[in-house]
Amino acid sequence: MAGGDSAMNLSDLIPVAGMIVSVIAAAAVARHQIRKLEIDADKSAARLDTQDIRLDKLTTATEVLDRRTDTLSKILSPENLEARTRTIESIRVDVEWIKKKLEAK
């Protein structure tokens, strides 16, 4: 009967050993998949960093263009153009007056 008990114990160990091997294999597959996910996450983080840098550059360029556009719109505003036109006309009148004075001498 002692021999029968050991045979039964051995037959009980075979499924347990199979389960242990299955758990080890599943752990190895899970470890591989986790590593792959970590690599993918690192790649995604690097792409996000690149996109952040590009976005910062575009934001800066847009701000520069906005400032330039604002400056040009102020320079070309009707009020400024009118004031410059009056100044130019005043200078033209002064030049004509100086010419007449020089011609009279």
Image (cartoon, helix red, strand yellow):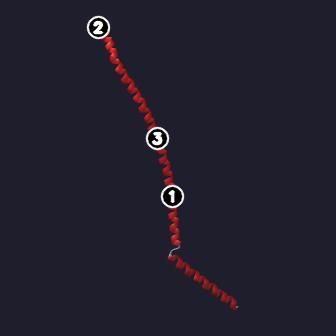
Nearer to me, 95 or 61: 61
Q: Is residue 7 left or right of residue 94?
A: left
Residue underneath mark 2: 1
- Name the secondary structure under disc 3: helix
Q: Mark 3 or mark 2: name the one nearer the start of the chain.
A: 2
Amino acid type, callout 3: Asp
- Name the secondary structure under disc 1: helix
- Distance Cα–Cα, label 3 vs label 1: 30 Å
- In the rendered image, residue 59, in percent from the top left (x then y), is placed at 49, 57
Nearer to me, 17 or 35: 17
In this rendering, the label closer to the viewer, 3 or 2: 2
Residue underneath mark 1: 60
- Distance Cα–Cα, label 2 vs label 1: 88 Å
Residue found at the far bottom of this picture:
104
Quadrant occupied by the N terminus = top left
Report if the CB atoms under discs 3 and 2 are less than 8 Å apart. Answer: no
Q: Residue at x 46, y 44 (%)?
A: 44
Q: Residue at x 49, y 54 (%)?
A: 55
Amino acid type, callout 1: Thr
- Name the secondary structure under disc 2: loop
- In the rendered image, residue 72, in percent from the top left (x then y), is placed at 53, 69
Residue underneath mark 3: 40
- From what the image shows, is residue 74 above or below residue 87? above
- Distance Cα–Cα, label 3 vs label 2: 59 Å
Amino acid type, callout 2: Met
Q: Residue at x 33, y 16 (%)?
A: 11
Nearer to me, 93 or 13: 13
Q: Mark 2 or mark 1: name the one nearer the start of the chain.
A: 2
